[in-house]
Image: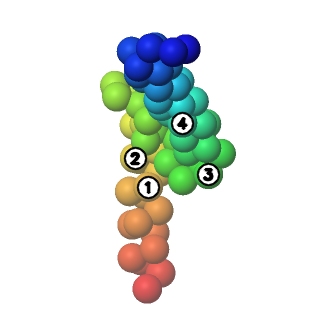
Amino acid sequence: MSNWQEWGVALILLVCAGRIVFTLFSFFRKNEKKSNPCQSCISACSLRSSYKEKRVSCGVVNKKIK
């Protein structure tokens, strides 16, 4: 690797690989937290609708208790 272009290409490939690894790591880390299972979904699904229904029903129950 004596040419500066080879070093530049190697650096760009390293940055791209690091970005891919970071994206995969953050995706699986979000799923481990279990804060919102539908946070990474982009389309509507039955899990998302049932999650919203339960959230609303729990809010109604909590308001009645207070």
Distance between mark 4 and mark 1 Cα atoms: 31 Å
Residue 21 or 53: which is nearer the viewer? 21
Pointer 3 residue: 33
Q: Looking at the image, is mark 3 or mark 4 earlier in the sequence?
A: 4
Pointer 1 residue: 55
Q: Residue at x 54, y 36 (%)?
A: 22
Distance between mark 2 and mark 3 Cα atoms: 18 Å
| Res 22 label | 4
Q: Amino acid at mark 1?
A: Arg
Give x and y (percent) for residue 59: 41, 66
Secondary structure of the residue carrying numbered label 1: helix
The extreme left residue here reads: 43
Q: Amino acid at mark 4?
A: Phe
Depicted 17 relative to depicted 64: above or below: above
Mark 4 nearby-residue class (10 Å; few <14, some 14–19, many ≥20):
few
Distance between mark 2 and mark 1 Cα atoms: 5 Å
Pointer 2 residue: 52
The extreme bottom residue here reads: 66
Query: Are the residues flagged by discs 4 and 1 in contact, CB closer than 8 Å?
Result: no
The quarter of the picture where the N terminus appears is top right
Q: Amino acid at mark 2?
A: Lys
